[in-house]
Image: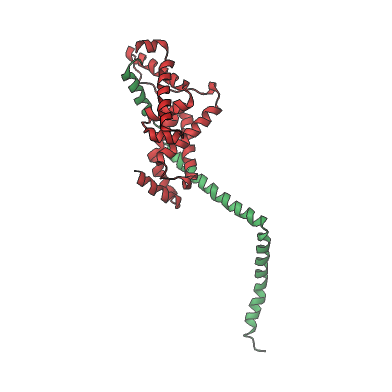
């Protein structure tokens, strides 16, 4: 090479390359976004799984039965305090 | 340092995402430096550095501290991304930016600028596997054993690639630069 010193200077120059100061923030922002996206994807996958396993209709029917039974349960509970 | 990295990784895996910033702060410079010297383009290098840290975060559970240091793992991801990026690009779209010496009108400075440009151009001409080993060994000052892990080759292959890279770099330098040496 032309000069060992100049070669070493070139290497030193290459070693001094610096990223922009916002890079850390950019990376962390993307990481947090990705995490939110991963959670949303997980939720979506769970919902799709529920839908596909036909668990969702059963769960919805069970909930509707439970909610529909509330007035009857209430009446049954109240009825014991009424003297005929 | 490595033990500390392991602790941070464990915390992040357990859900402390903010702890990841410590790893980013610690290693973004070597990763960026490596990608920048591989691709010769700051914009692409920042893109890939970001990509590397995001990919590392997503795959943090698969990181095995017994196999390699955290930086080695990051550089492995960075190396693969650089190779993919380089292969995707057409030769016309790849420009090598040089970190030019401080502007100065002196004759020495002009000569140095020329010499550095020639070295940059010669580095760009190296085959990817040689360039990668050269950047890791000469610029990043990584031990050969770590380079072997990053490149997924034997120690002997690393040494021979580095030797060939240096030889080729000398050969690729324009005639007048070699004559002056």
Q: How many marks?
A: 0
Q: Which residue, as the protein is rendered here, is positioned at the far bottom?
A: A84
Report x, y in % for residue A8. 33, 22
Q: Position of residue A25 (x, y in %)?
A: 44, 40
Residue depicted at x 33% and y 19%: A6
Q: How is the image coloured?
A: by chain
Q: Which quadrant: the N terminus of chain B?
A: top left
Color of chain A here?
green
Q: Is residue B178 above or below residue A72?
A: above
Chain coloured red in the rendered structure? B
The residue nearer to you, when weighing B115 against A21, is B115
Horizontal side of residue A44 vs B155, given as left or right: right
On screen, A4 above or below B32?
A: above
Residue B112, x across and y down, in percent? 35, 16
Asked whether residue A38 appears in the rendered view, the answer is yes
Does residue B47 appear anywhere in the picture? Answer: no
Q: Quadrant of residue B70?
A: top left
Point out residue B23 in the picture as x, y percentages from the top left corner.
40, 43
Q: Quadrant of residue B181?
A: top left
B60 or B44: nearer the eye? B60
Task: Tell me what residue is drawn at x 54 percent, y 48 percent.
Answer: A38
């Amino acid at each position: 090479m032309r000069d060992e010193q100049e070669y070493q200077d070139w290497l030193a120059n290459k070693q001094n390359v610096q990223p922009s100061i916002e890079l850390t923030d950019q990376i962390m922002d993307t990481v947090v976004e990705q995490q939110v996206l991963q959670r949303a994807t997980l939720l979506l996958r769970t919902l799709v799984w529920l839908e596909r396993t036909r668990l969702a209709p059963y769960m919805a029917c069970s909930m509707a039965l439970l909610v529909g039974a509330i007035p009857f349960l209430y009446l049954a509970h109240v009825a014991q305090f009424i003297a005929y | 340092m490595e033990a500390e990295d392991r602790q941070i990784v464990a915390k992040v895996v357990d859900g402390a995402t903010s702890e990841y910033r410590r790893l980013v702060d610690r290693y973004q410079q070597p990763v960026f430096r490596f990608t920048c010297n591989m691709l010769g383009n700051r914009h692409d290098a920042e893109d890939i550095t970001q990509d590397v840290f995001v990919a590392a975060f997503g795959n943090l559970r698969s990181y095995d501290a017994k196999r390699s240091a955290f930086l080695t793992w990051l550089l492995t991801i960075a190396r693969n991304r650089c190779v993919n990026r380089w292969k995707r690009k057409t030769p016309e779209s790849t420009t090598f930016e040089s970190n030019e010496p401080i502007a100065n009108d002196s004759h020495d400075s002009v000569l140095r600028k020329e010499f550095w440009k020639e070295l940059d151009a010669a580095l760009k001409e190296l085959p990817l596997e040689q360039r990668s080993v050269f950047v890791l060994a000469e610029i990043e000052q990584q031990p050969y054993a770590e380079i072997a892990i990053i490149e997924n080759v034997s120690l002997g292959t690393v040494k021979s690639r580095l030797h060939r890279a240096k030889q080729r770099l000398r050969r690729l330098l324009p005639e007048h630069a070699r004559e002056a040496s």
